[in-house]
Amino acid sequence: MSYLEEHFNQHLSAAYHIKHDEAIQREARNLQPHFAALSEMLNAREDTQNALYSADDFNVMFTAMARENGSLIRSSFIVTDAASFIDYAQNDCSAHYDGEGHSCYPPAAAIDKRQKMGFAQLLRINSDTRITQPVLSLNNDYIHDMDDPDTQQLISALEALYSVTTHDWLHHLSMYVVSNDQVVKANKFAALKEPMRAWNRAMDAPDLGYKQSAYEAWAVLTHAALLKGSVPLSAALNGCVDSFITQAQQKAESIASKTDEADRQAAYQELAYIFHLGVASLRYVAHTDTPTFTPFYSAFDDLLQNKEFGRAMAAVVNCDIAACARDDYKAHLVASNTVTKLFEERPSAQGHREKVDGYTADLFDMMRTHYAPTL
């Protein structure tokens, strides 16, 4: 069994066996900085009619949503390879999960060897609960040597980076909007289901250049605003970026010492591929022109001094990076993902961002009222 396959199955096996309430409590503890940042953002609005929020308010909402639906959407990513994710999606996997049900998103037929951000869902039939785990699967064509400790450390740093840039905790809090068999087990009789879906329908969609829903845009922009406005969350993001870059540079130094040319070229392609995925994760929290990307661009310039790395990166992103340097790389980042349109300085994008705070306040005011303890 490969490192990535074993890593994937060990994490899911642990998630399968944990008690539901314990899993909820662990996730809520990990999200305390997000809950604190969200309370600070809502408390800053000019609204004297509402009581101030506390982080505990969101802890109550998060826990109630998980218990009410028998579902937990986690925010920590697992990085694996596409072959392992395909095997999970299409086969029984009973050796790892005691033969009980599991599903995935995207649907099994849509998963192929290209890297995917998706979800692996464990249905624990005995307790009638589900845990939905975010997954990043890597294209096996770029995987070179997963037995190398430097590569494994780089993968761990990539997992941490994707975990801090994901907004899936907001999907958990608004679970009734995403309820379907691939993601959650939703309680169709819950009082909040229709009000939350009405809230979703009332949101303005972004412009046509952004292909995802208004709901997805809300989650992206709310999470991005919290990362930008919260000192602890911003520090966590910067720490993950620095750690990832350090591991990438350490891996590059190790590759440079290889004497076999074919082995060295394959290793550089693996590094370029994983490095690019790390950079790409930031597109969900900031525009590529902002200082958030600066450490990655500086590291990119340093790595690009090695021509073999430059050729490998050119193959990964399908353009002449070796000659064109960071400006063309930035252009590729923007062109290859429409999410960056949400952060542009166009009037339509700015106008949409200004509405998002109101959507967020409407949602959590409604939820806090619903989940307020009765006296």
Image: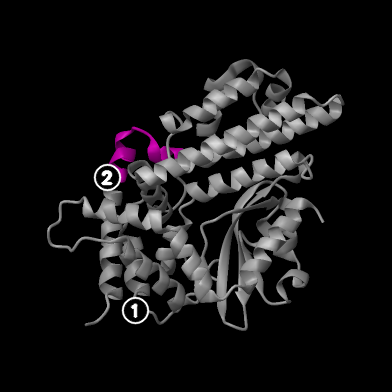
Residue in the foreground of this view, choosing between 29 and 178: 29
Q: Residue 270, relative to residue 68: is it above or below?
A: above
Tell me where residue 35 appears, x and y as whole percent.
36, 58
Residue 191 seen anywhere in this rendered image of the structure: yes
* Residue in the image at 28% along x and 61% along y: 54
Judged from this view, the residue extending furthest toward the right is 260
* SS at mark 2 in the image: helix
Q: Is residue 337 visible?
A: no
Residue range highlighted in magenta? 340-353
Quadrant of image for the C terminus: bottom left
Q: Is residue 352 magenta?
A: yes
Q: Quadrant of residue 97?
A: bottom right
Q: Residues within 10 Å of mark 2 (few under 14, many from 20)?
A: few
Q: Are marks 2 and 1 in contact (CB under 8 Å)?
A: no
- The color scheme shown is one colour
Does the magenta run of residues contain 242? no
In the image, residue 194 sits, relative to residue 27, either above or below, namely below
Question: Residue 263 location, x and y as percent?
Answer: 84, 31
Circle 1 sits in a helix, a strand or a loop, which is it?
A: loop
Q: Could you tell which of marks 2 and 1 lies nearer the N-terminus?
A: 1
Q: Residue 22's spot in the image, x, y percent?
A: 52, 72
The residue sitting at 27% across, 78% down in the picture is 373
Residue beneath disc 2: 354
**Residue drawn at point x = 13 percent, y = 62 percent:** 49
Left/right placement of residue 114 relative to residue 217 reads: right
Residue at image location 80% in from the left, 52% down from the top: 2
Percent position (x, y) of residue 289?
Answer: 43, 28
* Mark 1 nearby-residue class (10 Å; few <14, some 14–19, many ≥20): few
Residue at which label 1 appears: 191
Q: Quadrant of residue 369?
A: bottom left
Q: Amino acid at mark 1?
A: Ala
State the CA–CA distance, disc 2 to disc 1: 29 Å
